[in-house]
Amino acid sequence: MNVSVAYPEAARACASMIIEDRERHLFRVSRRAFTDEAVLEQERRRLFDECWLYVGHGSEIATNCDYITRSVGGRDLIFNRDRGGAVHAFLNTCPHRGATVVREPKGNALSFRCFYHGWSFNVNGRFASRFDEGNYGKDHYGGGCADLVQVPRLEHYRDFYFVNFDRNAVPLADYLAGAKEYIDLVADQAEVGMEIIGAGQQYVIKANWKLLAENSVDAFHGFPTHSTYFDYLKNVGSLSMDGVRDFSSNRMTDLGNGHAVIEYGSPWGRPIARWVPAWGEEKRDIVERLRQGLVQRFGQERGLRIAETSRNMIIFPNLVINDIMAITVRTFYPEAADRMAVTAWALGPRDEDHDLRKLRLFNFLEFLGPGGFATPDDQEALENCQRGYRNVREAGWNDISKGMPRQGRPNNDDEEQMRCFWREWRRRMSAGAP
Amino acid sequence: MNADILTPAAPVVTVPCTRAEVEDFLYAEAALLDEWRIEEWFALFAEGATYEVPPTGDTDDADPATALFYIADDYVRLRERVTRLTKKEAHSEFPRSRLRHLISNVRVLNVTAGVADVACSFVTYRAKRGVVDTYYGQHRYRIDCATRPWKIRSKRSTLDMDMLYPGKLSIIV
């Protein structure tokens, strides 16, 4: 871990931005954490330079020589599979003069060629140009000094690939901690594996990125913010409380390292595998077969847990995997203290039946995304929070105390999951503070 | 013998729709959206109609059964979208944004059996709380011109922005 000496003031300031008073059941976050450019700079160093960051799913580069380009943690990357099938992540910048080497969003290629001076590279990153003698020495050919620069660390868990720009970071498996169990609950939904469906939705929210980290695992806002979504479910026959336990009595789990998950009985249908009347009788059998298949593979308890419960998970700092009425994988980065860029993908079984895939995407769009019946109102809420932070000098603190006096396990609509996030945020942001 | 003689004729539309007529129809639609007369706007659609916003950067034949769209409404969900937008609990549009829908480059691509395939370019401005969002791209319509009044059978609005800079698609663009 890099201990910053250049920004001790920022570290000290960040330490003072969280107040946790267990006796008075108070948890407060300074609104400067959402507005201060110095905080954002500290986040770039302490979070995005040191945490494991999601780069992509193995299915996005399913075939040898497939590549995609993606921005991760402020860098432009090439995420690809070489001729032998090995997966790489390179900085998408020519070792010669720095131009972006691969400018297409995705493709399949035997080599990469920088258009500026024509330096080219094998898809394993090795310099592949051959110039006449006298142009370059042997360090360029096989010596590595003209190869594409690899991201320091690239590791994966169940086909979810992560990069880390800190060479000394703990292994990904240790970092993910309890989140692995919940990635399993998604990855186990198909024996042949899962896949990203089509391209991701890309959109901007004019709010600090951490507001979306909070919102993505916030059950408290569900009914007040999304009443029109639940009205819609009622109107079309998709709301089904059959077998759903009291929504507020479901649970939240601290997964360690700032990760957290909420679990609850689903009031909506799930393509895997909870049928609702709006889908019609013809879908009933196929959804029931999937449900039974999970029970056979994993036993009654785990099988039904995969099939019926919904789960919203934040993997610190900025990966959300929400397995709800569809599965969304979502990541987001700050463009400024008050602006983030979001990418959200849909995930589904590789061998999914055509009609169920159609239903999954239809289900996704009823709630999720900028054109859904719920996400736009989340965006509105986040942007209203950010606007409220203009009053930071006089009204300076967020309250994240809900559920603190509760004995035993937190409810899913408490705010303990956000407190998990913020404790980790403070730990990393204030490391080395004088 | 010519087989066509034995085939029942398609309903003959004596007056094929002209570009000017199509433009009048689209301008009237735009006015309804500008004025937030959204239930009247929905009444322009035929039963069974679809309304779609495909992913940016995808091909014209993108299919909502296999690709992740921004919006892929069937008739029922479009009705529900309109119903939602009439409520003040549709927070993203309460208070309502100010909208201006501009249409240009209208082309009638094909008219078969009274059904017209129409393409036009659009720019839609949305103003709210001091922020002006701009949406632009192409609308593709299938319009049933044999009925009175005309009915929209499908509308697909393909955005040209390479990402959704305004963030929300809480309006009808």
Image (cartoon, grey):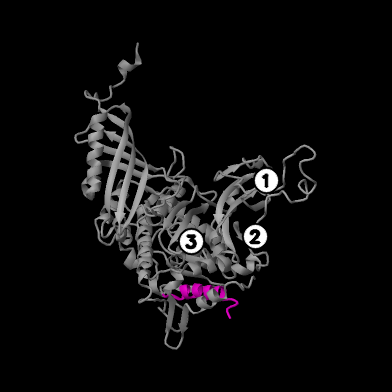
Q: Position of residue A425 (x, y in %)?
A: 52, 72
Magenta-tinted stretch: A414-434
Which comes sooner in the sequence, label 3 or label 2?
2
State the quadrant of the N terminus of chain A: bottom right
Q: Position of residue A412 (x, y in %)?
A: 43, 72
Say which amino acid is labelled 3. Pro
Which comes sooner in the sequence, label 1 or label 3?
1
Please tell me whether residue A431 belongs to the stretch shown in magenta. Answer: yes
Residue name at image x 38 percent, y 51 percent? A281
Say which amino acid is labelled 2. Glu
| Distance between mark 1 and mark 3 Cα atoms | 30 Å
Residue name at image x 32 percent, y 39 percent? B154
Task: List the residue tagged with mark 2.
Answer: A155
- Specify few, some or many for label 2: CA neighbours under 10 Å numbering under 14, 14-19, or 20 or more: some
Does the residue at mark 1 contact the one at mark 3 (Cβ under 8 Å)? no
Which numbered disc covers residue A123? 1
The subunit carrying tag 3 is A
**Can you tell which of label 2 and label 1 is closer to the viewer?**
1
Secondary structure type for disc 2? strand
Q: How would you classify the magenta stretch by its main secondary structure?
A: helix
Task: List the residue tagged with mark 3.
Answer: A334
The subunit carrying tag 1 is A
